[in-house]
Amino acid sequence: MIFEDNIFKKDYKKINIRFALTYPNIYKTAMSSLGYNILYNFINERDDTWCERVTYPNVHSIESNTPLKNFDIISFSLQFEEDYFNVLEILKKADIPLKRGERSENDPLIIAGGPCATANPMPLSDYIDVFIVGEGEVILNEFLDKFRENRDLNNFLDIDGIYIPEFDNNVKIALVENMDDAYHITDPIITRTDNDEYRTVFSDSIMLNVSRGCTRGCRFCMSSYLYRPIRETNIDKLVEIAIETRKNTGLNKITLIGAAVSDYSQIESLIKRLEEENFQISTPSLRIESITHESLKLLKESGLKTITLAPESIDTLRKRINKDIPDEKIFQVIEDAVGLDFNIKLYFLIGLPHETMDDIRSLCEYIEKIAKMHTSTYKIKFSINPVVPKPHTPLQWVGYNFKDMKRKSKYIKKNLRKYNVKIESPKKALIQYILSCGNRDISTIIEKSLTKNVTLHEWMEYLPEYDIDDELPWDNIDIGVKKEFLKIEYKRLESKKQTPWCEKSPCYNCGACKN
């Protein structure tokens, strides 16, 4: 059984727009997404709109069991490229024509947002009418106002952050400029269930949005470029939101949410302030560079049991990806975490530019050394993932070498089998790369996967390869960061030259800031 508190129920006869907030993944994943929760409450504050949720594999809404095809707008939240298959499956199952060119005014308007939609809308551009480029709070109210006037696509072209595949228009990302003006939930949906299939990751905690964006500039990471600049919520406002949400929900645990939580400029003060209000505190991940023994101790005292760290690779390769963290710092943080009896999860990448088999051998020795630092092998876990080049990053020109990745993965499995190591499938990463960096042509193979088993050979035929001066499929999506800046960063991979964190160095004019 599953029970929910704080859902919206409205009389559909008294509203103008029925909006299906559709997550093309399971309920547990959907309701663990702060962005998904924000949009649900944000849209439902409008008197003229009823926003209902639909999660894969269902094609009826949670709130009223209404079929998807009866909604005015269906909005897909695209957080993961692998969910593209589920988007098409949902449309087909809902008896809605897949191709936008085959739909009429009697069909729902299909829109999509989220990081994948923002970075590269092209793979799904044959199926989606409108893409939301950026953060929904900035765009959706104006979009819905115009939809009430006239749903003709031309009507939306003058809205910032709107990309319409039919017109292939140039678009600039729309972002919340001041986090104090962002939408912060104080009446979140609370899921109560004894079924693990529906129990959300943060089911017993308040998701507190401390910041958005990251400017560390790790050269493989899309978040380091897509949502610049970093924007922080005022510490007093965060404490106020936490207290108000506790009143509304009875929850006493806080999960700090942000692209770089431990980079929050007042992180230790925030933890102390929340502890003074008797909150327990957790965070999904911590950035090694900004962790102190004091911040770890505070988190432990507040009830946190597990910390997640991302060393990424060995020292020489970290320098190439602009993550120049000394080994001494990494080992000190791990030693402190072991001393405080944390469970530790560490993330590593393989397939970084200029990586050799000697580097992989060194990586295995490195991981083995870390594993031996903990008193129990059960308390330390390693996740090793093939690096997937992403749009709007310096790695967008690197490509993906499947055979090399497969060889390295096989070597690591063999040499680290006695440790708690999980390695992502090189084939799965290959498909993710094609979905991330492909053009409109890959819609063919996405659609084919609905009815047939697509072979590895067929996927390889769509493998993107771009030279540094090529026109890229996502060039008309302006995220603020200049392409010339990304080219400079790409060239710095060769020399291992670092680009300093702009929070602690002079502006290097990446283009994201307006000043």
Image: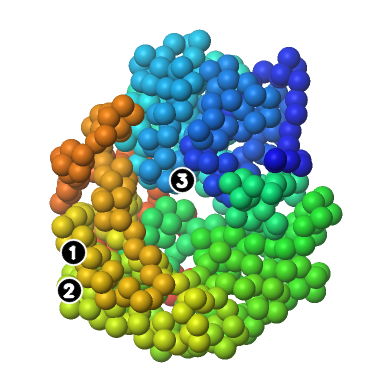
Q: Which residue is mark 1?
A: 407
In the rendered image, residue 189, in percent from the top left (x then y), is placed at 71, 44
In the rendered image, residue 53, in percent from the top left (x then y), is placed at 61, 33
Q: Residue at x 43, y 57 (%)?
A: 223
Asked whether the viewer can see residue 193, the reply is yes
Direction from residue 496 to residue 58 in the image, left or right: right
Classify the position of the N terminus by image quarter: top right
Q: CA distance from mark 1 to mark 3?
A: 29 Å
Q: Nearer the viewer, mark 1 or mark 3?
A: 1
Direction from residue 201 to residue 469 in the image, left or right: left
Q: Which residue is mark 3?
A: 79
Q: Which residue is mark 2?
A: 357
Tell me the crowding category of disc 3: few under 14, some 14 to 19, or many 20 or more residues within 10 angstroms, Cα based.
many
Q: Nearer the viewer, mark 3 or mark 2?
A: 2
Secondary element under disc 2, as helix, strand or loop, is: helix
Secondary element under disc 1, as helix, strand or loop, is: helix
Q: Residue at x 66, y 58 (%)?
A: 208
- Tell which circle, 1 or 3, labels the residue nearer the N-terminal end: 3
Please report contact status of discs 1 and 2: CB closer than 8 Å, yes or no: yes
Q: Residue at x 55, y 76 (%)?
A: 343
